[in-house]
């Protein structure tokens, strides 16, 4: 019996038609030709769902790099990935195409210094009134922008906020005080992309 072509049915990965049947390495190489300059930094995310969604967001908006700043694992203090490996399944394979770095959160200053040396402006994303945050809707971001996010319940450490260049917040009109970190990350990435669209 002859083989039947079921129109791309042999590639079940969650990729656009353009990338169907290309290797993971070829997809990543192609993405590298038109990534934006935006960098995302996620501090102490404990839920795999948030990590996986951040990776998907970074891929969807062609981010340059995603940095996880992990808590120190007291049993393995040199393990940059923190206390455990994260379950990558929720990222639907996008981790294969992204540039992901793991750093201990205590090494944040070295990471920030490197970004500043590369010409980046670092924005803490939070809504703490004492830091006089600017509305996301009123800021024009430079192409080289890095955004720092903390998990919703705990928020960002004061040290990271003070080491950043400014704080921005997402205006909300409802009763809830804050958004899930992966939702907030997606909103920021989309808003940045509206100011710095990627040419494909």
Image (tube, grey):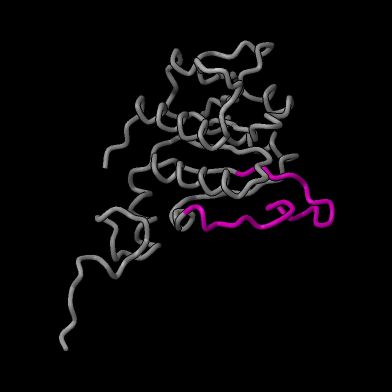
The magenta segment: 68-91
Residue 125 location, quadrant: top right
The residue at the point 70 percent across, 56 percent down is: 84
Residue located 44% across and 33% down the image: 189
79 displayed left or right of 198: right
Up the image or down, 17 lies above or below 157; here it is below
Q: Is residue 199 magenta-colored?
A: no
Image position of 93 (left or right of 147)? left
Task: Return the x and y of residue 179 as percentages of the image width and height.
Answer: 56, 28
Q: Residue 161, how many percent across, how many down?
A: 67, 24
Residue found at the far right of this picture: 75
Q: Quadrant of the C terminus?
A: top left
Q: Is residue 85 magenta?
A: yes
Q: Which quadrant of the rendered structure holds the N terminus?
A: bottom left
At a point 65% along the width and 42% down the height, the residue shown is: 45
Of residues 57 and 153, the one nearer the viewer is 153
């Amino acid at each position: 019996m002859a083989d039947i072509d079921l129109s791309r049915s042999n590639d079940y990965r969650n990729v656009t038609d353009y990338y169907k049947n290309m290797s993971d390495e070829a997809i990543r190489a192609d993405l590298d030709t038109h990534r934006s300059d935006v960098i995302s930094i996620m501090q102490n995310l404990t839920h795999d769902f948030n990590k996986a969604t951040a990776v998907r967001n970074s891929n969807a908006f062609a981010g340059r790099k995603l940095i996880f700043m992990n808590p120190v694992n007291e049993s393995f203090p040199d393990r940059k990935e923190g206390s455990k490996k994260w379950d990558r399944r929720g990222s639907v394979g996008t981790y294969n195409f992204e540039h992901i770095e793991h750093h201990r959160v205590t090494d944040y200053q070295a990471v920030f210094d490197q970004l500043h040396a590369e010409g980046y402006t670092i924005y803490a994303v939070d809504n703490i009134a004492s830091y006089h945050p600017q509305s996301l809707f009123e800021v024009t971001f430079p192409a080289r922008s890095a955004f720092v996010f903390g998990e919703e319940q705990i928020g960002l450490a004061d040290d990271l906020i003070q080491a950043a260049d400014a704080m921005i917040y997402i205006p909300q009109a409802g009763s809830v005080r804050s958004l899930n970190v992966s939702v907030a990350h997606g909103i920021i990435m989309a808003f940045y992309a509206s100011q710095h669209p990627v040419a494909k």
